Amino acid sequence: MKNRNSLHELYEQVTRQIIDERNQEMAVLIEEKRRLAENAQAQYRTGIDTINGVGLNLSSLEALDLELSATSDKELLSIETQMDEQSQQPLPTTELDIEGALLPEGAKQLTPGWLAAFSDDKAQDPLTEATTITPQTIIGGGACKNYFNWAKGKGSGLWGTGAGKIQSWIDFGFWFKPNATRYYNVRPLFRLRGYVIVKANDGVFTSKWAEIKVTARINVYQYNWKGWHSVTLHNERGANININHRVDIDQHTQSSYLLAGGDWAFIRCSIGLYAYARGGGSYAKNDFATGSANYLCVPHVHVF
């Protein structure tokens, strides 16, 4: 967008585009989950008939698994309580300017000027939940926010039934006005303080699974979007898995974009939280919200 448009007009255009795009993306994901659940249920009914036809009583096996899942749920509650207790005291964060000292002369440090969060969970879905954060133009505390999401499973998980699945995105926006036309290195700091729980206990006549994934993405807008760069920060998954540990990350990513001098650019940094759990007793949680210790943010971006 050329200088004939004010920064305010550009702000309205870009942020509205992001909000509309994310809402559409979430609507597509919600519809996809509905379709997959219906297909899984249809396959389950067909599969049950086949299994019963060869003399196996899957109903009795599922009843036994239901008891095991109830025990697993009690263990999970204990684990979550322990992790929450560990999250009450904030971890020390030493802000040494070592990184700044290594940057080229003239490097700019930008702080966030916009934030919004989006998720494909639904209030009526008992298998998923996420924090709600509305778009914000005034951000305090360096844009650090409390955010969590989780998914749990139910039943045997056979043929993909009983699956909770959730994708959340937290978008941070930064404004930058280049003084010359050239390629710029854009280097955000992604900071996460929190914990994950990934739990599944698959059996002979079950199909259980749990997974979490934390992603960092960056894109830049000047006249148009320049293209996404993506990095996986953390990933845990398995059919037989029982982990719970802190995830405390300070990670820089770096991308290069050709920008024109004299016109404003919008730098968009996104943190993606994915959780999936299938089958009773399965659970996946990204917790960057509990207590004083847990949060996530992109406190600054260096451009040089």
Image (tube, rainbow, N blue to C red):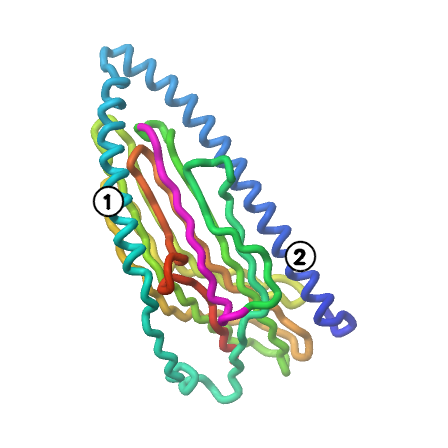
The image shows residue 181, relative to residue 1, as above or below, that is: below
The residue located at (60%, 72%) in the rendering is: 175
Residue 151 falls in which quadrant of the image?
top left
Instruction: Tell whether position 197 is magenta.
Output: no
Amino acid carrying label 2: it is Arg
- Residue 117 on image: x %, y %: 53, 55
Badge 2 density bin: few <14, some 14–19, many ≥20, Cα 10 Å: few
Q: Secondary structure at mark 1?
A: strand
Horizontally, residue 67 falls left or right of residue 25, namely left
Badge 1 density bin: few <14, some 14–19, many ≥20, Cα 10 Å: some
Residue 104 is tagged as none
For disc 1, the marked residue is: 241
The residue located at (34%, 13%) in the rendering is: 49
For disc 2, the marked residue is: 16
Amino acid carrying label 1: it is Ile
For the image, the number of numbered tags is 2
